[in-house]
Image: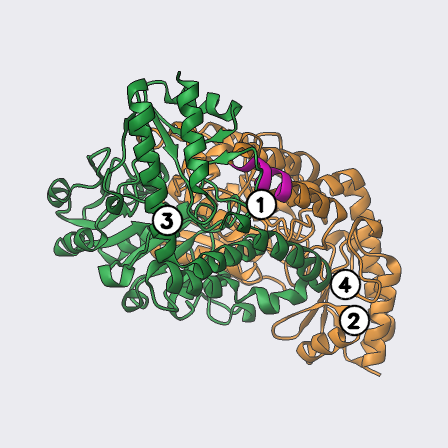
Chain colours: A orange, B green
Amino acid sequence: MAASVVVDPDLLYLDGNSLGRLTHRARRRLAAVVDGEWGEGLVRSWDSWIDLPARVGDAIAVHLVGARPGEVVVGDSTTVNLYKAAAAAVAARPGARAVVTDDDNFPTDRYVLEGLAARHGLEYREVASDPVHGPDPGALAPALAGAAVLCLSHVAYRSAALADMAELTRLAHDHGALALWDLSHAAGSVPIDVTGAGADLAVGCTYKYLNGGPGAPAFTYVRRELQSELRQPIWGWFGRVDQFGMGPRYDPAAGVGSWLTGTPSVLALACVEEGVGLLADAGIDRLRAKGMSLTSLAVDLADAWLAPRGYEVASPRDPARRGSHVALCHPEADRICADLLTVGVVTDFRAPDRLRLGPAPVATRFVDVWDALDRMRRLSA
Amino acid sequence: MAASVVVDPDLLYLDGNSLGRLTHRARRRLAAVVDGEWGEGLVRSWDSWIDLPARVGDAIAVHLVGARPGEVVVGDSTTVNLYKAAAAAVAARPGARAVVTDDDNFPTDRYVLEGLAARHGLEYREVASDPVHGPDPGALAPALAGAAVLCLSHVAYRSAALADMAELTRLAHDHGALALWDLSHAAGSVPIDVTGAGADLAVGCTYKYLNGGPGAPAFTYVRRELQSELRQPIWGWFGRVDQFGMGPRYDPAAGVGSWLTGTPSVLALACVEEGVGLLADAGIDRLRAKGMSLTSLAVDLADAWLAPRGYEVASPRDPARRGSHVALCHPEADRICADLLTVGVVTDFRAPDRLRLGPAPVATRFVDVWDALDRMRRLSA
């Protein structure tokens, strides 16, 4: 499958969990959008561009996250979408006293919730998670008393721990809270079933496993049954019914369309559409199977070659309990990450002591993982 | 100057006020960013990408809006930035009872303020403006009692009326309100002096006169003296000090950097940098002189050729009082706009009866305006 992306044969790229590769499809599509649609079509191209946020959203819904058409839309960043979702949840629970997340949630999620709590006089509750195995229902339960929303990542950004979305959503609901999921490290790496899990809201990144390119806009999922009840706080012209009528007063578009705000990046949306199309063609179940094998190979080689050199596997050992990356713990992870770059291995470092290996299944071969771990071994020899 | 953009010789493009043309500079830069920085550099390219929001912001500050370095940053959409700015103003005026704008402000500005007022229990006050000449200080003054913020457009999106930023900012300040300016139709079309005018906050679009491409991220200006006092509501990792430390708790970056939220679109930011560079090379004063001449030619030809056919000029007749577009009023403007497309003239329609001609000075020749008006005349013959 590696031929689907632009490949430098000398580079071992294990950072698909941070920035996905450039696909040939995206490269061709960009050329057509830039020269044909922007350069020649100019403003007339809005006739087709206007459908992109919903069309790409539907593709993500159906192929990647287990949602129904009309439940996902693409636009704004993960951070902004998370803000909109959390703010909508807070507004929908006027008697609530708190927002809840865990201390291993992605930093921007924690900051957004902290800021929202500060603005609305709510408690910001950050529950300790297991640094390897992720959220702990027993620790979360007492924190959910009086909570408006529980926000967690489906795949933990550091350890790759895969949270049980159905169980934790049920826990949130049992306490009267809405469940907001960050799918950034999960979408495109594991099959997701937001419908089956009963998730209320979700957001996710498109520049990791979806190969949308640096800073491509994120997606938002709003369960159909909640779309008329929840209202996001940023009332913009892209979320209004009859947008180009430019009428007086805001009147939200029906469905998930009201979660759009301003003009989304068309170039990036086109790349996201190609990335999602590539994953849909490959099939998320096949990608998942390959992802488990790739990370299992990395774990096995780490045990065999790197454990004697001071590394420790810091991800769940059961491949069914982790996403498509693997964290290794080493006191000198920062230096090692920099040294690996000099021998053509791209990983990433997360403070204070984690090295992440993210062999995106759509673009990484088994030999790439083997060679990368081999270079790590030699480096530590 | 037309050779700076990709040109279809059969097309008369008078919609630079809606979507700026593709420049050759942006096209070349995109190719380098896509193939070199994304395709080959991959995540390593963040070493240079991370500076883009501030670097492009500084270029806009210095070359286009009369701000100082460190006062402008690029990221998120105009709508989201307007929300952040207005919310920060509301939070900074805890005793205020209202937010104020005018009924000719751009729709998304009005919707954002309406939503913010609804969420925070404030009055949303929309003051009538003159549909041709813009905001009326006499009408605005009584509405400013108890206001947290006055939000206006520097150049009106329909009529192109150029508001007196210094006078209206003073008016806001006299009433204890902050002045928030939307520069979307002004940036790159008229010289702006936010510093001289004492403006507190401003936002602006980069896909119109700045040629950043469809959906390119917008900019935000925060006056230096207010940067430690004002706090925007979306606390994201891109706005935190030591972003990649990913530490606990949000700690805002110094200066305007704390107004960033999530990952901005890198491809679009690169295009914006090229667009701003082109305008800086041309010089805003020369562009302004050409813009006044282009729109004056359009007004003169409209008077001579189109007035007898039922058109009326709906922009200020003094070129010093308008931006770089011209509005014509005609009861069948919608149909005319569509008919003009069939003869290769791109304008745009704004309900209920306005046709806008936006001859962006960096990319439009005088003969283009002449020929476009000539085709309009023949169409109405």
Q: What are the residue bounds of the magenta stretch? A: A33-42
Residue drawn at x 22%, y 39% as measured from the top left: B134
Residue A36 falls inside the magenta stretch: yes
Same chain, labels 1 and 2: no
Mark on residue A344? Answer: 2
Disc 4 secondary structure class: strand
Q: CA distance from mark 1 to mark 2?
A: 39 Å
Establish if A54 lies above or below A94. Answer: above
Task: Determine the secondary structure under disc 2.
Answer: loop
Q: Is residue B339 above or below residue A267?
A: above
* Place of residue B290 in the rendered image (x, y in percent of width and height, measured from the top left): 37, 49
Q: How far apart are the alpha carbons under marks 1 and 4?
A: 36 Å
Instruction: Name the residue carrying label 1.
Output: B6
Q: Nearer the viewer, mark 3 or mark 1?
A: 3
The alpha-carbon separation of the residues under discs 4 and 2 comes to 8 Å
Q: Are marks 3 and 1 in contact (CB under 8 Å)?
A: no
